[in-house]
Image: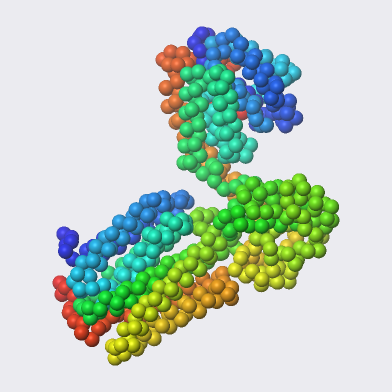
Amino acid sequence: MSDAPHLFVVGASHHTTPLELREKLALDAIKMAEFQQALSTLPGLREFTVLNTCNRVEIYGVADSAETTTRLQEIFCTLQAIQAEDFASIRHTAGGLAAIEHAITVAAGLDSQMLGETEILGQLKDAYAVAQSRRTVGPVLNRVFQKTFQHAKHVRTNTAITEGNISVANVAVELALKIFGDLSTTRVLLLGAGEIGEKTAKAFQSRGARDLTVSSRTLERSMSVATTLGAAALPWEQVNSRLADYSIVVASTAAPGAILTPAEVMPAMRSRPAEPLFFIDLALPRDIDPATAELENVFLYNLDDLAKIAGDNRAARAAEVGRAQIMVREKAAALWKKIVPHAGGQTPPAPVAGLPRHLGDAPAGSG
Amino acid sequence: MLDFSDDRTWLWLAAAAYFGGFVLGTVALLRDRRHSRGWMYAIITIGYLLQTTGLYFRGLEVKGCPLGNTFELYQFTAWSAITLYLVVGPAFRLSLLGYFTCMLTTTLTLLSLLMPSWDAIHRTGIFGGNAWIEFHAALALFSYGVFGLLALTSIMYLLQVFSLKSRHLSGFFSFLPSIRDLDHMNLRLLATGVVLLAASLGVGSVYWLSDIDSVNLLKLLLTVTVWIAYSAACVLRIRQRLIAKRLAWTCIVLFALALISVPFLRSDHKNSESSPSPYTQK
């Protein structure tokens, strides 16, 4: 076994860890500080960064020996009150080139539960920033992370893994953008108080919709949801008469039949014929009569439509994974060649005991 | 060998540049990618400079704005549309507008270049040395360029509505601008075209009133009809009577009719001279 320092990643993610266990693995702020403090004083650990999200806990590091990484895992298990055997059964590990491949794969969103999501890149950057501020990264990890961020961006830009939204709420927002271009002038009316309706309304708020109004069968319920969302409440009886004031209507009531038909929508359109009206019907049974879509300047999408678009986008992203992985391998190999001198001589350092050198030997994420 | 003293050489090169832009856009769309707006703008600018050079040489030959035959009228209309695109394109950043403009100008310029009979006769001195008449004619043709761009944004509007109503959202359709942006653009272009044509008719009317015999009645009727039709569409749009798809279809049909009427709009002053084109003599 070589004593040369080696690059490694060890952790657990959503791939092998059920939600209940992931909740136990995730480090809260206090434990995170404790863990990092413990690692800072761990003999033989030259550099490290801890990535801690709701879907994964991973430690990227450079260690002098396999014993150091074993000790690191023991510290983690003790801190989180997990049996070492249990952790060993769910953990994923990689060393050297495979560790770099894994870092780029994670940063590019290829290893995420929602393929291609971009939040993980920010989380990885935050983890690296913390490590920088604590001075726990050195020549190897600095290079690995800085290049990883560049390569992840390259993969995202040159493949379609981030294209198209894959959640119903974001698909609805994307469609609204195709109709209105800019949401800052749009007023959104949320009918009913279903969970999916609320999520969609929040998505519109986060994308800059001018204002949001909630209307439910009972005013109390409307007020309650409106307070949660920072929105206004509209009495149910006034929905028809005020329909013309809104550009986007998100319907998710539990009504047994259609609550808006062409007869109700037509007067609203007559008062503002040049302005489009976008209905998002998330209810089952449907809240908006399908015949409403025949009206000029009215656009209607129901839950099935949105789910199909999200599914198509998901499939399109999945189709790009192979191409993205080839890019990751190429970029990782190029980076690894530059890292080798820093990571222990001109030849790739020996893998940590029990850690495969290549991701392909035991894919990170597969335990 | 290319003869750079021949205006048609420059106009062919301009048509090739516009066609290049069209091909670039088509390839990008077939590969499901958004074409580079910068590249498209650069190619169109190159085409515009080449076309301007060609029209300048033709202008020197005919001693005025080259509006003396059908070939020149189509070339000038295409040049006007490009001029407007170069001005409004970067400001409004309408995705695919450059691509559609390339499509229109490629059609107009190639069509005019491929029809020798349209350029068989060169008329010189068609404005009788009157700069105001020249301005009137150029302004009228420029408004046709505006209406050409309006027809393009109307087509884009109809495609976007079709895309949203029929759930065809991927590929080419995913790059189209929003319904509202296109609607606003349509209204702006419609109003601009109407104002420009009104100004052109205003300038022309001063001349007509002073020399009524010189007026070609058919040309006058056609121009005024086009202006009335577009003005009516503009007023109805502002009053929200003619909106959405009906407005888009109206603008497309009106431009098609306006294009058909272009050969009848030739300026032909009583003192003008006609000569066979050197191109047709070769």
| Residue A44 percent location from the top left of the image | 56, 10
Please determine whether, in this image, residue A221 is positioned above or below residue A55. below
**Is residue A196 found left or right of B5 in the rendered image?**
right
Q: At 41% across and 15% down in the image, what residue appears?
A: A346
Which of the two residues, A110 or B68, is positioned nearer the viewer here? B68
| Residue B6 percent location from the top left of the image | 18, 66
Q: At 51% across and 39% down in the image, what residue appears?
A: A156
* Chosen colour scheme: rainbow
Q: At 75% across and 60% down in the image, what residue appears?
A: A287
Residue B118 appears in the figure: no
- The quadrant the C terminus of chain A occupies is top right
Please determine whether, in this image, residue A328 is positioned above or below residue A208. above
Q: How many marks?
A: 0
**Is residue A13 found left or right of B268 in the rendered image?**
right
| Residue A241 percent location from the top left of the image | 75, 67
Which of the two residues, A86 or A234, is positioned nearer the viewer here? A234
Please determine whether, in this image, residue A7 is positioned above or below residue B253. above
**Is residue B45 found left or right of A307 in the rendered image?**
left
Quadrant assignment, res B52 = bottom left
Q: At 83% across and 55% down in the image, what residue appears?
A: A219
**Is residue B67 found left or right of A15 in the rendered image?**
left
Please determine whether, in this image, residue A70 is positioned above or below residue A210. above
Residue A336 appears in the figure: yes
Which of the two residues, A87 or B25, is positioned nearer the viewer here? B25
Which of the two residues, A12 or A278, is positioned nearer the viewer here? A278
